[in-house]
Image (cartoon, rainbow, N blue to C red):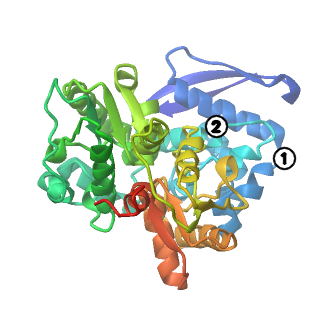
Amino acid sequence: MYFLQVALCSRPRTVKYRSFNHSDGLTCVVDPKMDPEIEEMVRIAESCALCRCGCCKDECPMYAELLEETISPKGRNQVIRAVVKGVVEPDGRVARIAYSCLLCRRDEMSCAAALKNADATEAFRRYLADSGVPPLPEHALLLKSIENYGNPWQESRAARKRWAKGPSDRRIVRGKTETLFYVGCTFALDRTLQETPRALSRLMERAGVDFGCLLEEELCCGSTVKRIGQSRLYDKLRAENEKALLGTGAKRLVTACAGCFKTLTQDYPGISKKIKVQHSTELLADLVSEGKLKFGRTSLKVTYHDPCHLGRHTGVYDPPRAILRSIPGLKLIEMKNSRELSRCCGGGAGVKTAYPEVAAKAALARLREAEKTGADIVVTSCPFCVQTLKAAAVQSGSRMDIVELSVFLDGLPGPDGKVVK
């Protein structure tokens, strides 16, 4: 047994550990006041140290590009352990290591000990922030934008309703509208992606869904700030959002953003217990199975890319595939790595901002895998996947088109052979 001081929120805590052999696992006896996420972070780091296998490196997209031990999940867990023990000071070097992870969970599919390394890394980022380590300079502007404007894109709140100029006015009527369409910052504010909320709105209208939007009153869900460890700002956003979302009186919340979906279902207990939260792929799959959405015949060949937040984080694999397989004549070709084994696009967890060149290489690796299927189109269900894969296609001169699922469906002919828009 040994004792060590853990700095958390500037208050040292004494943590007591008792280690057993690896077959029996690791038991940590801790101060009951200690943050459970930090406690679990330490447990994962210690368990990884006992295992020593390094299987996680085989499928880590960041390690594949950088070939640095501390960038791998195993190496990062060793850094976590060293920092908590006081062997290594939590400085800029450590911060760079902490923010090198995509939090994609692909490595966890290969981990012999079934450790949740992404959870440990996310907790470590918060641990560093709470210990006074400043955010990376690349993240500072993003955080300032969220503090000032309620979104990471340095856009005014009024800009959130620009995408809605096409569809009819769908402002939510509090206490009456059944479904709230939560658009999310990136789909609402990135002009290259605004066709997604328009397309999803048209599909819901066609299927007779009673829905409404908050438009300029919508606030960032806080997914980005939570993933980069800024807990105080995240808690503020969550509190404001829970009040606003519950105040709509909606019975169902639908979002097309995989990051928003993960955050609202897993990190907003006050929401997920009172409102049914669905990803757009789940809603659209329901509408297809109920016969409320039908599509005409097409000869297109497509492959589907599983976003990390929608797939490994929240387990939504079947709905998008059920939709695509319902389309007459369409050929769905799976990539070598799909579903739980899907490669990350490189766009998550602040890596695209801090390590743009590495993120671009990860996106290109995924695009090359898609090209090998012989498909015409990559269909996906996440704004960041669309951004990174499209950029990779443009830079590499790829013939493949990258399309968000709602946009793809909205462009298909109806049963009568005509495109309905």
Give x and y (percent) for residue 161.
Answer: 16, 53
| The C terminus lies in quadrant | bottom left
Residue 84, compared with residue 79, is above or below; it is above
Q: Earlier in the sequence, mark 2 or mark 1?
A: 1
Q: In the rendered structure, are the residues bearing label 2 and label 1 in contact, judged by CB atoms less than 8 Å apart?
A: no
Asked if residue 107 lies left or right of residue 293, the reply is right
Amino acid of disc 1? Cys
Q: Residue furthest top?
A: 32
Q: Residue furthest bottom?
A: 397
Residue at left 43%, top 49%?
A: 294
| Total labels drawn | 2
List the residue tagged with mark 2.
85
Residue at left 58%, top 61%?
A: 329
User: Gap between marks 2 and 1, in whole Å?
Assistant: 22 Å
Residue at left 80%, top 25%?
A: 25
Helix or strand or loop: what does disc 1 sit on?
loop
Q: For residue 265, what is the image quadrant?
A: top left
Amino acid of disc 2? Lys
Question: Relative to the observer, which residue lies in front, 326 or 382?
Answer: 326
Name the disc covering residue 53, or none.
Answer: 1
Residue at left 28%, top 39%?
A: 208
Residue 396, compared with residue 389, is above or below; it is below
Disc 1 packing (10 Å; few <14; some 14–19; many ≥20): few
Give x and y (percent) for residue 44.
Answer: 68, 34
Residue 246, compared with residue 298, is above or below; it is above
Asked if residue 129 lies left or right of residue 304, the reply is left
